Image (cartoon, rainbow, N blue to C red):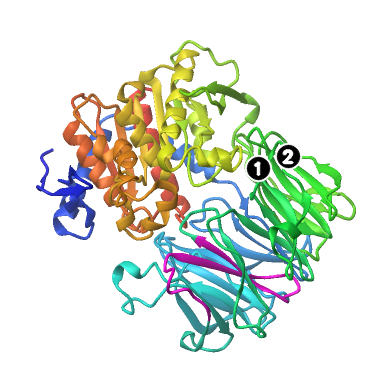
Amino acid sequence: MSIRKDRIIDNFHGTAVADPYRWLEDSEDSEVKEWIARQQGVRADFFAGEDPRPELEERLIDLWDYPRVSHPVQVGPWYFYQKNSGLQPQPVLYRQEGLSGEPEVVLDPNLWSEDGTVALSNYSLDDGAKYLAYTVSVSGSDRQDIHIRDLDRRENLDEVIQWCRFTNMAWLGEQGFYYSRYPKPGTVAPEDEVNYNQVYWHTLGTPQDEDTLVYDDPQAKELSFSPFLTADEDYLLLHVRHGTDPRNGLYVQKPGEVKVFVHLFEPGEASYTFLGNDGSRFYLLTDLAAPKGRIVAVELDRPSRENWVEVLPEGEDVIAEARYLHSEFVVSFMHNVQSVLRIYGSDGEFRKEIPLPTMGSVQGLSGKQHQSELFIGFTSFLYPDVNLHYDLETGALEFFGRQELKFNPEEFQTSQVFYPSKDGTEVSMYLVHRRGLKLDGNNPCLLYGYGGFNISITPSFSPSRILWLELGGIYAVANLRGGSEYGEKWHLAGMLEKKQNVFDDFISAAEWLIENNYTRPQRLAIEGRSNGGLLVSACMTQRPDLYGAVLCIVPVTDMLRFHRFTVGRYWIPEYGDPDKADHFPFLYRYSPLHNVHPADYPATFVITAHGDDRVVPGHAFKFAAALQEAQRGSAPILLRVDTKSGHGHGKSIIKIIQENTDIYGFLTKIFNI
């Protein structure tokens, strides 16, 4: 397919860099739309003839058709949770009185649009559960509006709060709530519409233009703020972040008394997570001088480090999450990328371990400081997500909701192996496959990775993965550097100038699978999404001989211009800044777009969405165009562009099934399964 190539040359610190496909960055341009239409035609031609997708879609629909319940939240006598009965486009928000009460619908987002592309993003309730504030996202956008519902009267208030992204709502009694927002479009330059984050107070029953500005920092326009209140509502706190850097700041004030926030900690030094307080004594989870995490007590009138009291010191395992409730600490540890859940007293003394159903991951803990009930979200590779209810007074542990299986998990097995990376570092990898697998090198294998932003990739359930296992495939998950599986040192070893370690870890995982006869290059597929899309696109340009197929989904591929689109500048702490002379060399060295050269590339499926305003589709467009131009082999390079969806959040079940139908249809054709 011929394609327009412009003569655009940028000068980066004395290095000339061509960008012939820059015109593809504008997805609204008519010529770009025509190019996308031709790409969709190429994809249709690939599936023409013997098309495996109808049968695959039928099985995926069956596998997805089971009830799924989100993490419950107890507010007053009510338990709130979201539930999808199976194939509903969006989950429905319910509440029930007591653990065995009759569920009643609070909000049904499926009534908000005909195609199921309007989603409930987040919600928050006042302590009396009289009012509900919730955010709405349209077509997968990160942009959100806040709506407020009177639960007694079952109707919404008139006001709608706009220009928010990823905000939470911190209620103060029934008066109103604190929230964060961005400038109204048109009041700042277009490139600053996702800068200048501000914290506001909203009083119920008033329009947004009467909201009170509580905090901003015009001199540091790239900071963002998350407001929340202590359980006693005596203190307003702000988690302060610069981009995606996990090393946040923590600011505090007394609502209505002090107009100036006390800066307990500034962003950029360490991470601080507020767990709870006893008056002016704050309990924090931090990685300061403890890469695997520790819990400390800080007195507000003496917050300097020498006055801290260490409650729970750093141990061998990483603290993944913690809660302070019922005067106890519930701590989720990560032991070799598996969850362990323990309870400690307020003095840090070990009390007991909470048993978990199987090898897997704690996906969340919920419970308020004054409560004695805890909800535990748990998941694993072979069992759907489940919620456990734990009574801290009696020690009783029981399931909340029920599990339904559309397959037999006993037919499959999960194991964990450790393999050496290029520099000798031991890396964990999970393997899931049918029991009795023959190690003859002929098995189709799907290797998944992420490796970035301090995010751990732990055991989790996906109905679509079950389809792959039923097809005889192996599913492998590599726990790469750049994540937090082994603490902040593990994260730091895979960011900025050390990003190549992540790619080396992934390439070594592929080599291990081949060397140990699980598969061979022609039967090995790799998959990554978002930052993981960067991972697989970099690895395929560095080692195109190592894979038979690549799934490159909502990828970051242009490491010299990523910071110029939407929220891309917030990734600079993780990736680096190409406009800095000392950062440009390592970014240019691995930037996937700039390392596409004529070669025999594996079959590649690049997937993006028109409404992705986090990783703009221009990354995928330019990379697909460059690969198609450089392909010297016969393997297809396909592009899929979804409409009315975004980076992934809020995507309807139907769209998820359609995307996975194309993905596994692609793999079954390439591998002749």
Q: Residue at x 51, y 41 (%)?
A: 492
Which portion, as a residue range, is magenta?
214-241
| Residue 237 drawn at (x, y percent) | 63, 70
Q: Nearer the viewer, residue 391 or 671?
A: 391
Q: Nearer the viewer, residue 294 or 646?
A: 294
Residue 584 falls in image quadrant: top left
In this rendering, the answer to whether 160 lies above or below 362 is below
| Residue 644 drawn at (x, y percent) | 35, 59
Q: Residue at x 13, y 49 (%)?
A: 8
Mark 2: amino acid: Gly
Q: Is residue 529 visible?
A: no
Task: Check if residue 226 falls in the magenta segment.
Answer: yes
Q: Residue at x 47, y 29 (%)?
A: 505
In which quadrant will I find the N terminus?
Answer: top left
List the residue tagged with mark 1: 292
Question: Element type at marker 2?
Answer: loop
Is 235 situated left or right of 391 in this image?
left
User: Which of disc 1 and disc 2 is earlier in sequence?
Assistant: 1
Question: Element type at marker 1?
Answer: loop
Mark 1: amino acid: Lys
Task: Check if residue 212 falls in the magenta segment.
Answer: no
Residue with the most extreme front position? 306
List the residue tagged with mark 2: 315
Q: Nearer the viewer, residue 561 or 68?
A: 561
